Image (tube, grey):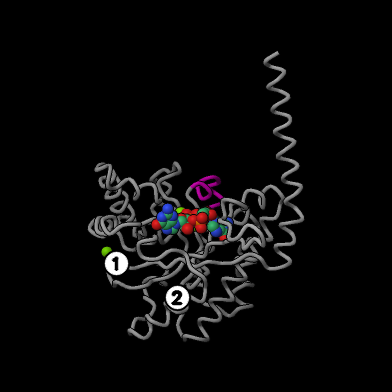
Amino acid sequence: KLHQTEVVFFERGMDDMFAQLMDMEPVLKRAFKEDQFVLYLQPQFDFDHQQLCGFEALIRWQHPERGLLAPAEFLPYIEQLGLTETLDTWVLEKTASILRKWEQQFAHCWPIAVNLSAQQFQHFQLIDQLQSLIRKYQITPGSLELEITETIAMSDLHNGMSVINKLRTLGFTVAIDDFGTGHSSLAYLRSLPISKIKIDRSFVSELQQNRTDATILKAMIRLAHGLGKRVIAEGIETDDQQNILQQLGCDMMQGYFYSPPMRIEFAEQMIESELEAGREPLRDSLAAT
Ligand code: C2E
Ligand code: MG
Ligand code: MG
Ligand code: MG
């Protein structure tokens, strides 16, 4: 009897999910058509030079009734409805158009990192798509950084490595996102031709309570530097966290302490004040090491 109830409950649960998904389909399609998605840019800070060194593009949905929605609230629907490619293309086009505008407006270009979905990374046309993108917008490949999560990079190593190799050859910067949360073998990390490692926020947020995390962070940074890769810490929220990370030799930081993700016009204001203070984009943030 109990078993039966569970089955019924389960089935109803599935129905609800399915119904919800079906409800979402026209809403999301309209969102694309009516241009309701927005790119926010979160600034990144370089410790050695004590200045802005780039941005990460983070998508938001300006929902007509529910307000500004974070990716966790809609990316799962996008994925299940098969709209990932549409979204990915939108993000890449939007980012490229910002870079193009900056090159013209500021005569300098601060790099922007985009998050690649698993589907995008595994798509056989990714390289072609990126090449036509840089041609269309006339941007330097070095100003577009591609973030791939550790899990995606490791899921199909043979293919992954050849894709990353091609991206690097074309001059794109490749960063491993959420580093430390997957299960990458150090040997593989060594052979992945990436330039940057983004230490996951979870390691940073535990810093104050848990002294052992400083040891882990120190080892991660050492390892990355030993392999010739630059390190950025995600989710820095306090002065203490910033100080510890800097002391441990971390190269860059990103987090609410420096700046939350912001609308493009605010990012542009930030660039303007950097330029007014005589600070230009850093060469090593663009260099394909
Ligand atoms: P992610 O790439 O690891 O992005 C970092 C997330 O941490 C962002 O959440 C950012 O807003 C948040 N964050 C930044 N600083 C802090 C901090 O100091 N404290 C805390 N608590 N959080 C901080 P967001 O924007 O909600 O994005 C979540 C995830 O959604 C991203 O994780 C990324 O995996 C995915 N995502 C976002 N935009 C895109 C996109 O355009 N395409 C794809 N495929 N995925 C995206
Ligand atoms: Mg990211
Ligand atoms: Mg991350
Ligand atoms: Mg340093």
Q: What amino acid is labelled 2 in the image?
A: Trp
The answer to whether mark 1 is within 8 Å of ligand 4 is: yes
Apparent side of residue 241 relative to residue 10 in the rendered image (left or right): left
Q: What amino acid is labelled 1 in the image?
A: Phe
Q: Residue at x 71, y 23 (%)?
A: 7
Q: Which residue is drawn at 68% across and 22% down?
A: 6
Seen in the picture, residue 222 relative to 211 is either above or below; the reply is below
Q: Does the magenta stretch include residue 162?
A: yes
Residue at numbered disc 1 = 47
* C-alpha gap between disc 2 and disc 1: 16 Å
* Quadrant of the image occupied by residue 88: bottom right
Q: Could you say which is closer to the camera, residue 208 or residue 198?
A: 208
Q: Residue at x 59, y 51 (%)?
A: 73
Residue 176 in sight in this render = no
Q: Label 2, secondary structure: give it.
A: loop
Label 1 packing within 10 angstroms: few (<14), some (14-19), many (20+): many
Label 2 packing within 10 angstroms: few (<14), some (14-19), many (20+): many
Q: Quadrant of the C terminus?
A: bottom left
Q: In which quarter of the image is the N terminus?
A: top right
From the top left corner, tell me how far across and down residue 54 is, in percent: 42, 70
N-term-proximal mark, 2 vs 1? 1
Residue 110, label in figure: 2
From the top left corner, tell me how far across and down residue 42 is, in percent: 45, 66
Q: Is residue 258 magenta?
A: no
Q: Could you say which is closer to the camera, residue 237 or residue 199?
A: 237
Which region shows up in magenta? 151-163
Q: Do the residues labelled 2 and 1 touch (CB within 8 Å)?
A: no
Most distant residue in the front direction: 65
Quadrant of ligand 4: it is: bottom left
Apparent side of residue 210 relative to residue 60 in the rendered image (left or right): left
